[in-house]
Structures are given as C-alpha cells and as structure tokens.
Amino acid sequence: MPDAARPPRHVLILGGTTEARRLAAALAVEPALRVTTSLAGRVAAPRLPAGEVRIGGFGGPEGQARWLREHAVDALIDATHPFADTISHNAAVAAATAHVPLLALRRPGWVPGPGDSWHQVTSLDEAAAALPALGTRIFLTTGRMGLAHFAHLTGLWFLVRSVDAPEPPHPPRMTTLLDRGPFTLDGERQLLRDHRIDVLVTKDSGAAATAAKLTAAREAGLPVVVVRRPPLPEGVPVAADPDEAVHWIRRLFSEANAR
C-alpha cells in the first residue's frame, strides 16, 4: 500500500451488490486509501457501504471519465450487478479515456446440477417466448425493471418478487411480493407451494443469497428459465470475490509506488 507521506489513493467502486459492500468495508479501514462507492439510485432505500457514497449517474462514459479526472481516482472497480451491462460498458470506456486501471468484480455464476431442468436463454424476450410452453403460474425473479418484456403474456399469472414496487407496463395478471434476500430454502419451498408455481424465471446473478429458489425448484421438479449473463467488455480483468479485488488493489499500488 502507499506510504504515509503520499496522499490517499482514491478507489471508486461502482456498487449496489453485496460484494461491493464487502469490498468497501475491507478497503475503508486502510488509512492510505480513500474509498468512494457510486450507487445508481434505482433502489429507494439502498444499503449504504463504508466510506464515501455518491448516488446517481455520471452522464454517460464521457461524464464518468470527467468525474474520474476531477476526483483524482486512482483505481476503478466495477462491482455492479452481473446484468448491469450498460454501466460496465460505460466504465470500460471511461477508464480507458481517463487512463484509470479498471477491475470487474463478478461473483461466479450458477451451474446446473443433477435433477435441474434449466432452459437457458440470452434475453428477457427469449425468456418470455419460452414460458407459454412450460407453464401458467410463473415465479418471476428477474427484477422490476424488465417486466415490460412479459406484459403481453395475458394468459399467464405471475408472482413478481422485487425490492421496490414495479411500475407499468407489466403483466396484467400479476401479484407483487416486496422482499429482499437472502432467502431461505424453507421459505422458497413454501412460496412455491402457496402460489402453486409451475415455472421459475431468473437471471444468472450467482451468489448464495438468492440461490435457494433453484434448489426448491429442483426438488419440486419445476422447469427454470435462466437468462444468461451478458459478456464483460473485452480486456477487463476480473476478480471472483472481494478478497481477490483487495489483492489486485494492493498489487496495483505497490507496483505504482515502485516506479
């Protein structure tokens, strides 16, 4: 890490995930670092991380590059949701423009196991197209922002779980469950039984906090429509967990100090 005579190195974390909060907590205790987490502001009451916090967009990659320069950012960590591909693209362009090292922090994705009945698709539109042939009572866990892709499925009933209440357009036959993970296996089993769910739809967000629904669906013999992750921008290094990201930061600043 930098020596005490040097101004604190500024690390900007693009957050909103559990991994981002863990990383901010690990870095914020380092006296030689200044840690800022940027949140998109899409959740009404976000869980705030350690260190400084800014909320809101940057105004595209040009605005983000300007922010990186104006706030003397020494390293950028993209620890956003695996499906926040626009943010990740903008971060890659901004980091290259401002000549700031960039790391993507991405939890590993889920892998189907014995007994799973997965139907993997590449988009929400593909997920919607697959549903009529699979069932009629859908547990939709892809988030409130993409409900418009399912709004035309008037013959299906949806249980939508979301942190905040969704806004139209959305399916006409829909019940909303406002909740935030982690979720227990017993709770997911009960939810599937109570609502007579016959299809689960999810994004491959990874992590254990929301994985119990996959086990519950496997036990119940339900088909699961899984939306694959978008690829990361080419050339961006990846850390699988916050510990790897901390090591990357330490190595980065150690090498910079040695120059």
Image (spheres, helix red, strand yellow):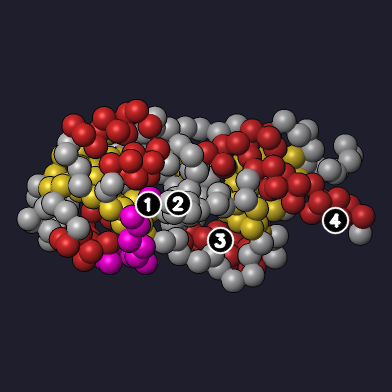
* Amino acid at the residue labelled 1: Asp
As measured in the structure, the alpha-carbon distance from the residue carrying label 4 to the one carrying label 3 is: 22 Å
CA gap between label 3 and label 2 equals 34 Å
Name the mark nearer the viewer: 4 or 1. Answer: 1
- Label 3, on which residue? 91
Q: Give the residue furthest to the right.
A: 258
Label 4 crowd (10 A; few <14 / some 14-19 / many >=20): few
* Structural distance between the alpha carbons of marks 4 and 1: 47 Å
> Compared with residue 184, is residue 164 higher up or lower down, i.e. above or below?
below
Which residue is disc 1 drawn over?
116
**Mark 1 element type:** loop
Q: Quadrant of the N terminus?
A: top right
- Check residue 113 in the rendering and tell me which mark sits there, or answer none: 2
Which residues make up the magenta segment? Answer: 115-126
Hey, what amino acid is under mark 4?
Answer: Ala
Query: Foreground residue, 247 or 252?
Result: 247
**Residue extending furthest bottom?**
234
